[in-house]
Amino acid sequence: MLSPNMNYSALKESYLFYHIARKTGAYLAEHPEKRLYRMGIGDVSLPLPPAVISALHEAVEDQGRKDRFHGYMPECGAPFLREAIAAHYRKRGVRLSPEEVFVSSGASDELGDLQDLFAPESGALIIEPAYPAYVDACVMAGRKMLRLPSGPENHFLPLPTEGLEADLIYLCSPNNPTGAVFSREQLSRWVDFAASRGAVILFDAAYEAFIEEDLPHSIFEIPGAESCAIEICSLSKTAGFTGTRLGYTVIPKALARRGMNLNAMWVRNRTTKTNGVSYILQKGGAAVFTEEGQRQIRENIGIYKENARMLMAALDRIGLRYWGGRNAPYLWLACPEGMDSWAFFDRLLREIQVVGTPGEGFGACGEGFFRFSTFASPEDTREAAGRLVRLLGKK
Amino acid sequence: MLSPNMNYSALKESYLFYHIARKTGAYLAEHPEKRLYRMGIGDVSLPLPPAVISALHEAVEDQGRKDRFHGYMPECGAPFLREAIAAHYRKRGVRLSPEEVFVSSGASDELGDLQDLFAPESGALIIEPAYPAYVDACVMAGRKMLRLPSGPENHFLPLPTEGLEADLIYLCSPNNPTGAVFSREQLSRWVDFAASRGAVILFDAAYEAFIEEDLPHSIFEIPGAESCAIEICSLSKTAGFTGTRLGYTVIPKALARRGMNLNAMWVRNRTTKTNGVSYILQKGGAAVFTEEGQRQIRENIGIYKENARMLMAALDRIGLRYWGGRNAPYLWLACPEGMDSWAFFDRLLREIQVVGTPGEGFGACGEGFFRFSTFASPEDTREAAGRLVRLLGKK
């Protein structure tokens, strides 16, 4: 008799965003005349920039012409894109060879697939509040997890302490959901800790494009990271690729454990378990790294940052404490009057039709907090900000 | 200290197609004036059909317009595509609900990812000669493997025998590399065997579109398969998507083992470990299932079938024994004069610049055999067929 992966039976029943979708669906079924202001799921609202659209059209055209058609792509990524990404890193002082850059279908896909590189007995350290898929992917792998809670007392940026047990360390900076960003000194502490223990950091840099201040965009800006970190990046929020799909991952050639080179292992994984990422999408992705593409994505990010400012102004007027928003596309706030986060979710949904994300969904220490995404349209964000002030502002 | 997945250290050093690429690269470096006739890797040469191209352009256009833009897609596939695929199955008498169809980035990707559903202690049965990635994915999972050799004596279509041990059974029909296709009776034997043991069949149907005779395209044409099989399908060969990427997988709701429902497990896997397949690619894929799309892919498949006929005629003239070609895009032949398959590879490369695939790369029992793909251009195939006859034909 085949035995399924019984680790799945240890998964908590329902996934945060599924639960939100069910609640908003039920509300709309009862109130079909209402319109929602969705700032719950971190999905972008602006279309792809023109440079990407024209590269995609051109690539589609190639696929329709015999003399320009592309069959199987190299499994680890097209050289033109691996080189463009390595060049992008060079601009911020990080030297990578194109063979250290792997093209992916997106950060979520990659965070799931990367589990295969690590023995299940390697334990994971997850800073909470955390993106729920980190936890679920570790549960599926049967991996022991240590959850390191964070809170206002450490600005949601906990540091390693002596005796902390971890083989695989998830760091997300700028953080989802809290918007907190590690400084160079703080990241160095994590890099030194990982190096001293022989641990490996999975650095989720999906939101790096939103950093405004002088803070590290890449863990490879920290000396020593090349022998203890993997960086997972995404074009989803950077360039509006949530529904188009493309990302990239950096696995340095210097990264090895117990005699196994992790870059070489990933090459083997990709050549065995994939046939590469779509030519069309890789051409679209390459356009993001052109001068024109970079200018256009900065414009879009500027619009989302204006959303963040509208929401921050509203929270300031209400007098609610919040984190993030400046260097991240998320705002993380303390629920008013000690309300629990699902109760606050229900209140906003029912009274002002504003949808956010309850902090509890990101781990127990997220209880009492709430996340707003800044990716809605400016019109919706302005309306939501106004409704928040009218509902919660001092009378 | 992090422990990598040490199963990777048990992988054989080099991958078949990598080895072929190295040998052909070295030959071209020595003989830059030569042109190769590539029938080694099963990559298509015809561009995507016009119906797909126009759907892709339209989807790209959507992604550039605010009012038509698509963000995150449902993780298991867009309803429009899941429904189109379920309708396609209905035409051949297989009733599926759209929720039993999962959109994938392609069959290779899916065959790798599906490993996660099964406990590593579940053993795999692999009929050899076999697609090497089956074996490597099982090695990576630390799965015990039983290899069931096949040969001319059973037309490369072995059947289960009493006492055969297997929890996970890989079947590929039409077969890569042999081109052999299971009949309904033969497949029923495998379905009954799997059902009686509580095993699960992974049915790789990547080449079903090449079947001409009255043979099963889907394992779900066999009664009882819905409770013991998963079917993995691809648009790569069917519609020229090798470099564009799209596939689909059927996991029936009736498929459960040890109290775990495999359809529900896969929903959980996809929602945790992916953010869905590109909207653009799914729109392109949906065009394949329209009347126009089906007519256009039939035309392309007809061209590859004409290639097969040219190669079969050449092998007939030479007097070499072969299998496949009629219902499959591969021809599988016995090397002349008992030559070993890498020696035959070298001879064809050096003497007539024709590249095929040595049978040994598909498992020990493939030694002495050789694979030709029928996906090259008609011009290259005609030239290669002529060169084969001149080199090997009776003087």
Image (cartoon, coloured by chain):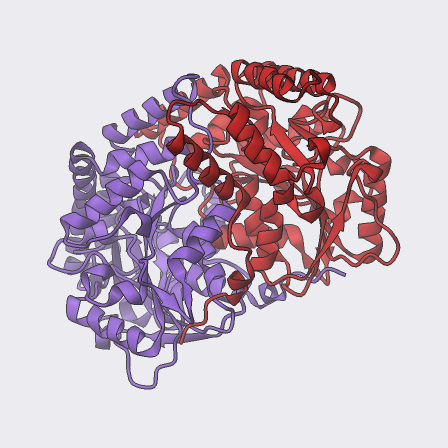
Chain colours: A purple, B red
* In front of the other: B295 or A348: B295
**Residue in view at x 46 percent, y 31 percent:** B243
Q: Is residue A174 rendered to the left or right of residue B39?
A: left
- Specify the quadrant of the image occupied by residue B72: top left
Q: Residue B296: give x, y in percent of width and height.
A: 57, 15
Residue lying at the far right of the rendered structure: B162
* In front of the other: A189 or B47: B47
Residue lying at the far bottom of the rendered structure: A163
Q: Residue A153: give x, y in percent of width and height.
A: 22, 77
Q: Quadrant of the C terminus of chain A?
A: bottom left
Q: Is residue B187 rendered to the left or right of residue B25?
A: right
**Residue in view at x 51 percent, y 29 percent:** B350
Q: Is residue B138 above or below residue B301?
A: below
Q: Residue A65: give x, y in percent of width and height.
A: 42, 16
Residue lying at the far front of the rendered structure: B395
**Residue in view at x 44 percent, y 22 percent:** B35
Total number of numbered discs in the rendering = 0
Say if residue B117 shows up in the picture.
yes
* In front of the other: B182 or A208: B182
Q: Is residue A190 above or below residue B264?
A: below
Say if residue B234 shows up in the picture.
no
Q: Is residue B284 above or below residue A198?
A: above
- Specify the quadrant of the image occupied by residue B342: top right
Residue lying at the far left of the rendered structure: A214
Q: Is residue B157 rendered to the left or right of residue B123?
A: right
Q: Quadrant of the N terminus of chain A?
A: bottom right
